[in-house]
Image: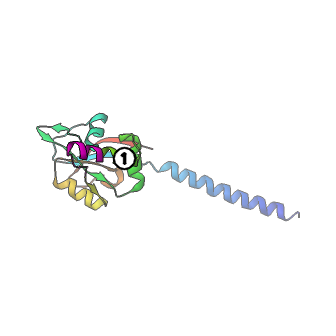
Amino acid sequence: MERGVPVKRGWIRILLAAALWSAAACAQRHDVVVLIDNAGSNVTSLSSVEVRKLFMGLTVMRGGHALRALRNDSDRRLEQIFLQNVVAMSDTTYERRVLGLALRQGRAPPPAAHSVADLLRKIAHDPELVSFAWASDVAGKPGIRIIRTLWQE
């Protein structure tokens, strides 16, 4: 019995140390969601209302050109953060609203990129596209510009 107590305490200390290390590692990781566009675009800023309208499929104009949204479906967590914190809707509600606009007004829902490589390629080749991504995925990428931070942990 006497020997079991120090062994248990040793395991508890190891588990506690592992938990603290894990928490410290998570605290050092800063996830940031950014709004991006083509580096040659004339978009200098978009308000929160304009971003929401754009991703709802409504028209947002800049420099005489209609901007178009490109959804980033490459990461489920990123998409959930975007919908909850930027569009302020659940994915089901968002899909219903976009479909409703498509049916009532004939507006096409925003297309989606299913990988980061596809997203970056499309944004780099079209100055009217606007999307969102993890800052770490787009930092320093040629042809891509970060317009603003949308969310950060």
Q: Position of residue 58 (x, y in %)?
A: 23, 40
Could you tell me residue 37's position as x and y percent?
23, 47
Q: Secondary structure at mark 1?
A: strand
Q: Is residue 47 left or right of residue 32?
A: left
Quarter residue 21 falls in: bottom right
Quarter of the rendering occupied by the N terminus:
bottom right
Say which residue appears at 88% left-offset and 63% top-offset.
2
Image spot of residue 56 (x, y percent): 28, 43
What residue sits right under mark 1 in the picture? 33
- Label 1 Cα crowd, 10 Å radius (few <14 / some 14-19 / many 20+): many
Residue 16 in the image: above or below residue 83: below
Count of numbered badges drawn on the protein = 1
Identify the residue shown where x is 35% and y is 41%.
Answer: 87
Region rendered in magenta: 99-110
Residue found at the very far left of the displayed protein: 64
As for residue 108 lying within the magenta part, the answer is yes
Is 81 included in the stretch rendered in magenta? no
Q: Residue furthest right?
A: 1
In the displayed structure, does residue 79 sit left or right of residue 41? Answer: right
Instruction: Give the camera-side residue of 146 and 108.
Output: 108
Quadrant for residue 65, please give it. Answer: top left
Residue 51 to residue 11: above or below: above
**Snapshot colouring:** rainbow
Residue kind at label 1, given as amino acid type: Val
